[in-house]
């Protein structure tokens, strides 16, 4: 049985539209890439987040110290995890679990500079982990979190390269 040309063209147009819509949806859901040349806040031994497990903030709702035996190298830093399961979650999607602004103080970035962090001064906003210098700075951060995030997002591309 021969399929009429108009039906074949219509099907091709439908398939193209469906594929295009799905590709746009996937692109929209994909996290933004790290800034080119971005550095990760790490201690002199090259360990990020002062050895705390970035996944635990999401899965346990609190900072948990990682262990050397569960580590992974990413973006030039060594990340420690409290379990192999958390390490594997991170390896599968590091952009989902890594702290914003390379793990530097989010408030500091909103003010135009890099600053160290206290892993116990943290917030998750819209599925993203933000760290602060200490609990005092965190209080200032919380007074206008959306405003600080907006400023930090604008500042980070330049600061990340400094």
Image (spheres, grey):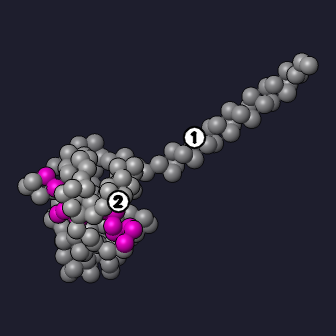
Residue 59 counted in the magenta span:
yes
Q: Which mark is residue 23?
A: 1
**Residue 69, visible in the rendered structure:** yes
Residue 124, x across and y down, in percent: 37, 70
Residue at the spot 22% in from the left edge and 68% down from the top edge: 65
Stretch of the chain drawn in magenta: 46-60
Mark 2–mark 1 Cα distance, whole angstroms, equals 29 Å
Which mark is in front, 2 or 1?
Answer: 2
The answer to whether 53 appears left or right of 2 in the picture is left
Which quarter of the figure has residue 42? Answer: bottom left
Residue underneath mark 2:
86
Q: Dot 2: what SS?
A: helix
Residue at the spot 57% in from the left edge and 47% down from the top edge: 25
Residue 13, x across and y down, in percent: 74, 31
Residue 63, x across and y down, in percent: 28, 72
Specify which label sits upstream in the sequence, 2 or 1.
1
Question: Which residue is at the front of the view, 159 or 80?
Answer: 80
- Vertical comparison of 126 with 84: above or below: below
Which quarter of the image is occupied by the N terminus?
top right
Mark 2 neighbour class, 10 Å CA radius: few under 14, some 14 to 19, many 20 or more? many
Residue 127, x across and y down, in percent: 42, 64
Which quarter of the figure has residue 12? Answer: top right
Mark 1 neighbour class, 10 Å CA radius: few under 14, some 14 to 19, many 20 or more? few
Q: Dot 1: what SS?
A: helix
Question: Which residue is at the front of the view, 151 or 84?
Answer: 84
The answer to whether 114 appears left or right of 142 in the picture is left
């Amino acid at each position: 049985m021969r399929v009429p040309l108009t039906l074949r063209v219509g099907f091709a147009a439908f398939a193209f539209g469906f594929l295009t819509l799905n590709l746009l949806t996937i692109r929209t859901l994909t996290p933004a890439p790290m800034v080119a040349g971005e550095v990760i806040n790490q201690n002199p031994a090259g360990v990020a987040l002062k050895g705390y497990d970035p996944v635990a903030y999401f899965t346990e709702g609190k900072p948990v110290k990682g262990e050397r035996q569960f580590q992974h190298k990413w973006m030039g830093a060594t990340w420690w995890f409290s379990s192999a399961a958390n390490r594997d979650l991170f390896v599968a999607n590091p952009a989902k679990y890594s702290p914003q602004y390379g793990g530097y103080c989010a408030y500091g970035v909103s003010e135009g500079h890099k600053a160290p962090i206290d892993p116990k001064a943290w917030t998750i906003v819209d599925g993203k982990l933000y760290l602060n210098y200490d609990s005092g700075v965190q209080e200032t951060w919380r007074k206008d979190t959306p405003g600080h995030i907006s400023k930090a997002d604008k500042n980070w591309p330049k600061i990340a390269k400094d």
